[in-house]
Amino acid sequence: MEHSMKLNEKSFKDMKNGIKIREYRINDEKRRNIKLGDTIKFTNLSDINDSILTKVEGLLYYSNWYSCYEDFFEKDLKQYYSSVEAAVIDTYNNWYSKYEEEQYGVVIIKIKLCKG
């Protein structure tokens, strides 16, 4: 099954260049439909004509942002944030609410670029 998601320009470019291999999302109804082996078409929010196709290679589920960020802080977030707590606060302020986190939990989607 193919899914669609949008990414800000920086994350999109990092994914397109193979630097970003994990996507962090709230595990809402849309994300609960994602299965291993599915594809996700990511579209650049700055240019809707720019998209990439990825394959889902892993799904990791967490009850909160702190836990998932803690597991991958060194690999994915240290260059952007001073601490796990700072990453969580940024998420609450800019992306997802505490209510959504408590309602749905969190998923990390491990992806690989499709050739083509």
Image: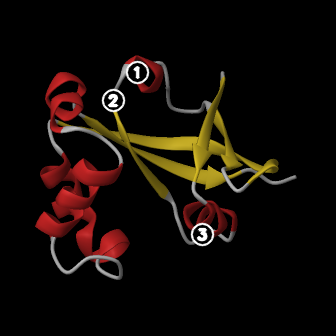
Amino acid type at circle 1 is Arg
* Left or right of residue 72, residue 54 in this image: right
Q: Residue 31: percent from the left, percent from the top? A: 44, 27
Identify the residue position indicated by label 1 in the image.
32
Distance between mark 2 and mark 1 Cα atoms: 6 Å
Q: Residues within 10 Å of mark 1 (few under 14, many from 20)?
A: few
- For mark 3, what is the residue? 14
Circles 3 and 2, Cβ within 8 Å, touching? The answer is no
Residue at x-position 51% and y-position 44%: 57
Q: How many marks?
A: 3
Can you tell which quarter of the image residue 47 is in? bottom right
Disc 3 secondary structure class: helix
Question: Looking at the image, which residue is at 27% across and 37% down?
Answer: 106
Q: Secondary structure at mark 2?
A: loop
| 36 lies left or right of 105 | right
Q: Name the amino acid type tagged 3.
A: Asp
> What color scheme is it?
secondary structure
Q: Position of residue 25 (x, y in %)?
A: 38, 41
Q: Does 21 appear above or below 67?
A: below
Write the residue at 63% across / 68% down: 18
Q: Residue at x 81, y 54 (%)?
A: 115
In 3D space, how far apart are the residues under numbered discs 1 and 3 (Cα atoms)?
24 Å
Badge 1 or badge 3: first in the primary sequence: 3
Q: Are marks 2 and 1 in contact (CB under 8 Å)?
A: yes
Q: Residue furthest front?
A: 93
Left or right: residue 42 compared with residue 72:
right
Closer to the N terminus: mark 2 or mark 1? Answer: 2
The quarter in which the N terminus is drawn is top right
Q: Is residue 96 above or below residue 66?
A: above
Q: Are marks 1 and 3 in contact (CB under 8 Å)?
A: no
State the residue position of label 2.
Answer: 27
